[in-house]
Image (cartoon, helix red, strand yellow):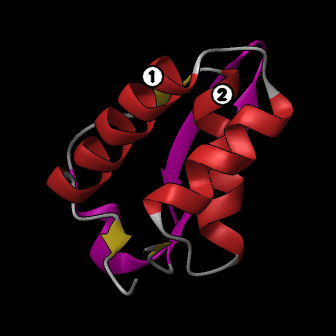
Amino acid sequence: MKIKEGFVVRKLGTQYVVVALSNEASQLNYLIKLNEIGAFMWEILAKKDTSKEELVKEVLKEYDASEEQVTNDVNEFISILKEKKILKDEK
């Protein structure tokens, strides 16, 4: 999985917000706000094609949380990105 081109995350104050840069993406009428862990996962998915398992491992290395909680968070995050058509499912 990887973030589609045309989307980036910007930090606005203490919030992280997904911004659509391309014409196609800018037609979308929703706003996605991310917490710190969501922004961390976004950066990983924006850089390279990553599996769910790889994403869970990266989050576990960075944050003090249980594997079960991280797996649930990753699954929810991926589900939202797929629903909003922001994620390319390559892996």
Q: Residue at x 31, y 78 (%)?
A: 89
The image quadrant of residue 52 is bottom left
Q: CA distance from mark 1 to mark 2?
A: 15 Å
- Residue where numbered disc 2 is placed: 37
Query: Outermost residue toward the front?
Result: 67
Q: Residue at x 36, y 27 (%)?
A: 72
* 19 shown above or below 6: above
* 69 shown above or below 88: above
Amino acid type at circle 1 is: Glu
Residue 28, position as x, y percentages in the image: 22, 55
Residue 1, position as x, y percentages in the image: 43, 74
Q: Secondary structure at mark 1?
A: helix
Query: Dot 2, how many residues are within 10 Å of its Cα: few (below 14), some (14-19), or many (20+)?
Result: some
Residue 58 numbered mark, or none: none
Q: Residue at x 51, y 44 (%)?
A: 18
**Magenta range:** 6-28
Residue 53, position as x, y percentages in the image: 51, 57
Magenta-span inclusion, residue 40 = no
- Can residue 8 be seen at all in this image of the molecule? no
Query: Dot 1, how many residues are within 10 Å of its Cα: few (below 14), some (14-19), or many (20+)?
Result: few
Residue 32, position as x, y percentages in the image: 40, 34
Q: As drawn, is 67 to the left or to the right of 60?
A: left
- Can residue 82 be seen at all in this image of the molecule? yes
Query: Outermost residue toward the bottom?
Result: 90
Front-most of 57 and 28? 57
Residue 68 numbered mark, or none: 1
